[in-house]
Amino acid sequence: MSLSSAGDICRVCRSEGTQDKPLYHPCVCTGSIKFIHQECLVQWLKHSRKEYCELCKHRFAFTPIYSPDMPSRLPVQDIFAGLVTSVGTAIRYWFHYTLVAFAWLGVVPLTACRIYKCLFTGSVSSLLTLPLDMLSTENLMADCLQGCFVVTCTLCAFISLVWLREQIVHGGAPQWLEQNQQQQPQHAPAPQLNEGPGQGVGENQPAPAAAAPLADNGPAAEVPDIQVDPVEDMELEDEAGAEDVGDANNGAQDDMNWNALEWDRAAEELTWERMLGLDGSLVFLEHVFWVVSLNTLFILVFAFCPYHIGHFSVVGLGFENNVQASHFEGLITTIVGYIFLAMTLILCHGLAALVRFQRSRHLLGVCYIVVKVSLLVVVEIGVFPVICGWWLDICSLEMFDASLKDRELSFESAPGTTMFLHWLVGMVYVFYFASFILLLREVLRPGVLWFLRNLNDPDFNPVQEMIHLPIYRHLRRLILSVVVFGSIVLLMLWLPIRTIKFILPAFLPYNVMLYSDAPVSELSLELLLLQVVLPALLEQGHTRQWLKGLVRAWTVTAGYLLDLHSYLLGDQEENDDDADQQDNNNLQGRNNNAIPDGLHAAHQAILQQGGPVGFQPYHQPIKFTFKYISMCLVCLTLPVFAGRYLMSLWTGSAKIHELYTAACGLYVCWLSIRAITVLLAWMPQGRRVILLKVQEWTLMILKTVVVAVLLVGAIPLLLGLLFELVIVAPLRVPLDQTPLFYPWQDWALGVLHAKIIAAITLMGPQWWLKAVIEQVYANGIRNIDLHFIIRKLAAPVICVLLVSLCVPYVISAGIVPIVMQNLVQRRIYPLLVMVVMLVGILSFQIRQFKRLYEHIKNDKYLVGQRLVNYERKAAGRSTTATHSSSSQE
């Protein structure tokens, strides 16, 4: 029983303890929330589904109470019955999850693939033999994989349709679609035309402007001379009023019958586990049927019909041979079908508007919006990056000693791979160009980039623009984007390459071929670059601030070199003179509901005003062309020259990929510039401060080097050697041959393995290695703790790896006879790994058997549980199981 005073109350029910319901203090919490009833705690744990206190994070403990007649050991028949029950449950779950996997990973993709192939074969016999084709085992795995792709496409189409509907509902449909729906009879009140954005008025257009022509073009305005009988008019009004009352009554009755709780309950019951069949029920079979039906419907609507419309259109126009020669006949034919389908929908929409079929007009308009948005998405995400990728490749041919004939041959040999690579390059180029523009907005003066849309604008919604803006504006944007991106590639890539080719003919081309005789493995360098260097730069460094500072430094340097400082950044003297007036201007801007401070807001305000306001003077650059070409030559040649020289000191005359030479040269140049700028910043502080700074940085660099040697050098090398001895050598090298080990490649693979192990450790449960890695990562480089890293991380891991490498070798070389040493040395490493895995499996099974034993004992003899109090001692914190006198039955 807990030692609670008379004033103590339960933290849940706020009542005092009694003899039947005593108070407990099961966690570290103190004060008014220290005590609780066991019944209240049990109810709260059932509600919260947690096993620990949400405030102090202490795990609650319960002591089981067994029946007095429980034997000291369970009978064999009870254990056997529990084993049979557990095995039966496991078999049942195995069959159920096998059926789930077979349905979702076999039936659904297989039916989708076979139906897709049947529809696109173009023969009636394939439709007749479709049931038999479903049961065929020919190309089963390939059809399942292709079916997964088809199901993914249909699922994306379904999600896109739902999302597009939400965009139309919340953002409003185009004005031309909602124009006739906004028309009201003459006796209707005028204010109902402008009820809100749901009426379909565009975001940038006022509602009264849309309402005015509707009133002029109403039905009554077209026949003003027709005489209407007042009695007949009254009868028509009475009939209309009766219909309205009936509709209102029906609507009210529907509202009364509708129950929101039932819908909420149905939504709560339909979870992912229940839908996929992971809850143990067979309701998922119905969902499988509906998914197969929806796949078939989407294949018919979004693939079969557009493809055949495009095929008939291409054949009718006489472009069949040209389409077949493009190597993408299906894709181009489907896009042409969508284009003709959009044109057909426009014509049908116009005819429906002429004959005043409002529902048909609205339906055709929505279908046209869906087709229009789909085509625009294909153009923006598919066509435009491909154009950028090909233009980049064409403009950089001389850099790699290639020609258009080479690109044509590569396209003929692998058209799909070639187009994908160019699309990927174009996407990377567009993405990084947009990111660069966002950084430039924070550096350049307002007005320089007024013609570019701010992607960080909260009002910028590309999908809404696709819905509302007409096609000709999208085509104009596409042409302008191609011109802008293409001009940038010409100025920044093609023109410097031509100049370098003219001035330094021997400098180009760049070496991008892989050589097997190079002493440094290309694979090792790529793994090192992609798995170590780039993640370390992105994770440890403040990437955005670092890139912003780099862009600012580059802009300032380029501005001074090209005499564009006044144009790009403005006059610093003028900014210094106006610094005193900045607070007043900001206060006045806030009072006038102006935009907030910052370059982002200034750029956006200029864009919303349609261009630069007023005259913003700047100094015209002198000899801009000469300075620009000189700077491009230096940027493209100096890092490569420096990298080639430094790499030649290491590798000799062997040719190295220019990616590594350029990266090495850029790093050396950046390191030199950084050192010079740091020394210039330290010089005004005096010699003593410079010496202290140099000492501090030298100490930090030495610590970093020691840690890098241990964590990035020794541990990956030992791990790579162990992996080579355990897996690679036994599988690849026969017993009559001697395996050769390459330390550099083993180290590079060890780096990859170490990173994978560290990632799995961080994602796994809490244990000492995870805690140490998290602590090292949290300290970073500036606050590096060398003693902690060596004692807690490096020394234990290196000792374990050395023991794993040395013990098998000592056993094979010192105990085994000489005749069998070769065989034992080659097989002892994988044999010991198998032994360790077997011991781990046995220990796991023993723990599972103990859990099963406890489960059988609790099911038969457990009568209750007793809450365990948390006790504090003077020497420190400890938990003792203080048994109370009451128990929960």
Image: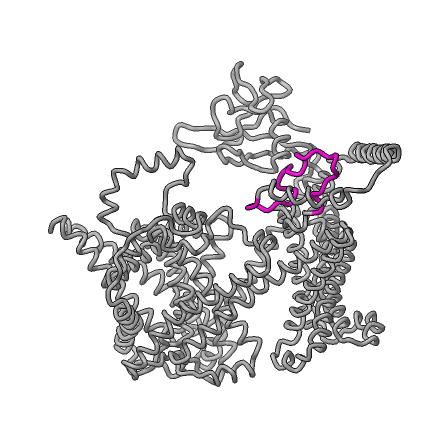
Q: Nearer the viewer, residue 529 or 620?
A: 620
In percent of width and height, residue 195 lies at 65, 37
Say if 513 sits above or below 41 in the image. Answer: below
564 on left or right of 345: left
Let me know if residue 670 is in the magenta part.
Answer: no
Instruction: Give the farthest residue toward the front.
Output: 225
Let me know if residue 194 is in the magenta part.
Answer: yes
Q: Nearer the viewer, residue 130 or 321?
A: 321
Coloration mode: one colour
- The number of numbered badges drawn on the structure is 0
User: Which quadrant of the figure contains the C terminus?
Assistant: top right
Residue under the point 66% across and 38% down: 193
Residue under the point 38% across and 75% down: 494
Residue 669 in which image quadrant: bottom left
User: Which quadrant of the figure contains the N terminus?
Assistant: top right
Residue 719, visible in the rendered structure: yes
7 on left or right of 528: right
Residue 708 in which image quadrant: bottom left
Magenta part of the chain? 180-205
Residue 540, visible in the rendered structure: no
In percent of width and height, residue 641 lies at 27, 75
535 on left or right of 15: left
In percent of width and height, residue 866 lies at 61, 30
Say if 27 sits above or below 557 in the image. Answer: above
Residue under the point 75% across and 54% down: 354
Residue under the point 68% across and 41% down: 215
